[in-house]
Structures are given as C-alpha cells and as structure tokens.
Image: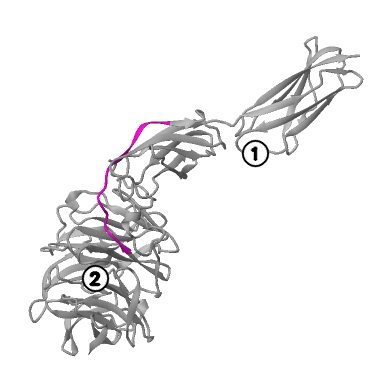
Amino acid sequence: MKKSQRLRRVTGAALAVVIGSAGLVAVGTPAAYAATPSDEVAKLPISSFGAMVVDSAHERVYVTDGGKGSDASQVLVYNFQGQRVGSLATDKPVSGMALSADGATLHVSQSNRMLKFDTETQTRTGATFAPYDVTCGREVALAGGKTWFTETPYSDSYCDRVDNTTWLHQVVDTSSVQTGWSAAGRLKLEAGPEAPDRLVMGQAAAGDKADPFLTTFDASGATLVRGPQRRFADAEGKGALDLKDIAQSADGKRIAVADAAYGTRLLDAADLADAPTGYQPLPAGAKSSAVAFSGDGKYVARGAAASGSTPDLLIQPADPAEGTTPIEFAFESELDGARVVPQGLGWAKDGSRLFAVTASGSQHWLHVIKPPAAQYDSRFTGTLGTSPATPVVGEPLGIRGRLELDGPASAEPVKVVAVRKDAEGTQEVAAARVAADGSFTVLDVPDRLGEATYTLRFLGDVTHRPAEDVKITVDVAKAPTSIELTAPAEATRAGGVGITGKLAGQGRALPSGIALKVTRTDRFGTTGELTSASVAADGTFRIKDLPNKRGRTLYEVSYDGDALHTASAARATVKITG
C-alpha cells in the first residue's frame, strides 16, 4: 500500500463524528472519515479559546473562552454527546483549567483568583487570590498533589515578547506563593495522572533570537526540583522550539511536543532526548498546534493549522513503531472551523472519544470523534479504459475501471475520486460512484490539448483501507469539425449557383468571424478561388456564384481549423447548363 500523503475526501457513517461534522472532510490513510447527515455541528459561543478539560468520570467537557479585560466570562460545560448542559459562572475573565486526579474538583483560573468547582454539583467550593493577569491568560496544572499556575502581568501586546516575564506560582491553602521560577515570554504547563509528580514546563516562542526551553520538575516535595532541560536550536541558531502544546503518554515514559516550527516531537521523559522512533512528519503546509494521548494508551492525536484540504488532525497508534499511516482530517468549512487551536485536543480516559476545538477567524467549534473500527483491504483490478478511445478537448471522456473490496460491504456509497494533471497543472475530477459489481466510470471534460494523466483513488471508508492509486495517460486531440452543403443538381450560367451550408464542431464553441475558403473547378480542370463564405453565429453560411463554363462544376468549401478544432472540408457537384 502506498504510504505517501494524499488528499482524502470521503464519508464514513460508522465513525460517529458526533458533532462538528457537517462540513468535516476526512482525509488520509488507512481510513478517511466524515459524519453522517444526522450529525450536528456544535458551535461554541466564544470568540477566543482558553483551555479544554475532559472529565471522564462525569462525562463532561469544560471549555473556557480565555477572556480578556474586565468583562466576566464563563466555563462552558458539554456532555460526551456534544450537547451543552450548563456553565460555571465566574465574575472575571477565565483562561486555564486543570482537573484533579479523581475528577472531583475542577480548578479554574480567573484574572484575579484561582477557583475550585465540585464537578458533581457544578458549584464553586473555593477561591484563592492570584496576582492580577488581565489579558495574557494563565496555564494551570496539578502535580505532586499541588496546584500550579502562571502569571504574565502585562498587556496583550507584550504577552509573547522577550522583554516580558512569566512567573510560576503555587496555590497554598487560600494563598498563592511565587516559586521563583520564571521565563521570558509565556510558559506552558503540563501535568497529569500519567506521572502524577511530574510538572512539565515549556517556554513559548519569545522573539526571533530566543531559544525556548523545555524542562520537567519533580513536584513531590515541598519545593520544585528541576529535572532534565533541553533547548532545540543548533549551533547556527536554527531549529528553535515554537511551542504550542505538551502531552504525556499514558505510561508516562514519553513526552510529545507540538512544535509549530518542527512538527510533533516525541521525547523520552527521562532525559528529554528524541525517542528512538518518532512520528512521521505532518502533511506539507501543516503547522503543529496540539497533541494529546488517549488515556488507554492506544492513540495519539496531532492537531495542526493548515489551509484548504491539507489535513489539520491526524489520529494514529501512540507507538510510532507500529508504522500505521494516520487517519487524517481536514477542517475546511465555515461550518466546522479551519484549524485545530493550540491545546485544543483532549481524550476520554478510555480512548472512546477525542474532543477537538477548531477555529476559523474568531469562530470556534467543538468536535467529538470516535477512533476507527477494523478495516479491510481494497484494490483496483484489471486495466483502465477510456471512452472514446481517443479523447478530444472539450468533449466528455469516460475512464472505466473496477474496484475490489474485501470484507463486508460499506455502509455508505463507495466512490472513486480522480485528479487530472496536464500542462495547465492539476485539477480535481468529480467522484464516480462504484456499482455493486465494482465497476465505475469517472467522467471528465479535458480542456487542453496534449498529454493528460489521470490518477484514480479510492480513499477508504470506515470498512476499507484506501487502494493503491492507479494512473492512465491519454493524448487529448483537437475536436473534430464538419461541413454540410446543400447544392442544386443543376443550374444555369445566367441564374447562377446558390449553395447553403453549415459548419459544426464538437467540444468548445467555434470562434466567431470564421471565413470559409471556397473554390470552383470546371469540367476542364481549371480551379479558381471564390469569395470566402462568412459563417453566421449559428454556423450557417451561403455561397452565390455565376459560373462561366457549362458542364459539371465542382465546388469545395474548407475550414482550416483553429487551436482546438480540426480542419474539415465538403464538396458539391453542380451541372451548369444554358
């Protein structure tokens, strides 16, 4: 099976993309998915994104809007079916969140306080003063049984600047204590049940000359003890980290980093060295924005910001040594967002659902995606054929083939897609539905002369893996033309000869202002050229001649052709008397 990255557009009912799917396009191998028509889009009522937390114990998803300024905001609450079921009221802008290991307490950061909510009753149970953070937003993490949060006390325009400083604080009872750890720009935090005493800290990009770090801390004691740290730029200053998100594998042995400058980095947690086997690169043009491991250890989800049909989300086995090509999703619609936001991925603990926040401009959406089911192989069989055998420019061309599918029949209609590559570039061709016997015909109208190569693809579905691409190259010829003449059998010299006719062409419309060449050959073999015949818009023309010789006279009308049409000619013989 071909392992190259390829754009995918298909529909798969069994994936159960519960929400955010009406415009979702799923792409890639080994499967490609989108939603069924009954699925709904969950539009988030926010203009910016702060954080997302998944509470598997109560099947709730919490989303903050990352509010700024002095206006109050709220924590939105959704169930695992993507339905909004409430909100947690706050009186100041909210940003970061973290969930206790037992799922009983949700910690939420306001611009002036750290709040605690009981996840069973959805009520506030406590508040801790925090240094004011008006616009930059906080990161919150729980490690070593303690709550940690960041403070970036400047206006929004300074949040990511190298001359700004972010501080790390700890919540102690009802007060916050500065730990003494700080860095230029902003800090990102990650902690969780995978390694309950480990706090991972990363420095977001802060100026072109900065070389951001990644480090870990042991949070089990009274004070933080720093572990390994790493900067990523080489001796020439290239390759610096552009940190967007951090995740820890289910066994705590790996740390994944969403690096917009590099892709998805997979590191050994013990020393932050590159893991022996990393994940394959993201599709060309995609910049890493988020990463998350499923709690059951089976999957990793990698989010990205990409344009058009370039994939924004990849789901694959968490162990890169398995070598499975990711399932890829492209968000390219005004109905479901255009990219995965930084830190916008989260899994249910059992790996049954992936939650993804996407954005397009200031609009945001929430998606709930289930991991793939078992799949079977597929393949193109036999050779491809064309009808007509010689295609012409501007005329329909059918490419016939056969697709063979293993396993059970697909729940949705199976389609073959195609692209045409010619001197003009690459153009997508309308998909063709596959019949029950596996036959299909892809239809296209080539619009350029010369060689054209068609690549046919079955992109896979919930039941079947994609097939190996097949190609056929054709030589597109000029469209034929024809001339019909209507002439009298006899005419007199005095009365003259009147001939009518019509010029017709296949493919694109013939150009206007055509003048046809007209010649007359008498019975003695003398040929002369007459006044050209002008062709009307409907292709008709008229010829009037006064011959000077008696006997059989041959009239020939010809068209030289044009850039897209062949030449043609017609003859008529008239007996001249009197």
Q: How is the image coloured?
A: one colour
Residue 379 included in the magenta stretch of the image: yes
Residue, disc 1: 509
| Magenta-drawn segment | 368-384
Q: Residue 8 got which mark?
A: none
Residue 240 in sight in this render? no
Q: Residue at label 2?
A: 203
Looking at the picture, does residue 136 appear above or below residue 393?
A: below
**Residue 78: quadrant of the picture:** bottom left
Label 2 SS: strand
x, y (%) of residue 100?
18, 77
Q: Front-most of 17 and 320?
A: 17
Residue 137 horizontal side relative to residue 384, left or right: left
Query: Is 450 left or right of 147, judged from the image as shown?
Result: right
Q: Earlier in the sequence, mark 1 or mark 2?
A: 2
Q: Residue at x 77, y 11 (%)?
A: 525
Residue 47 point in image, percent of width and height: 41, 74
| Percent x, y of residue 445 | 53, 39
Give me the residue at 12% from left, 79% from top.
Answer: 145
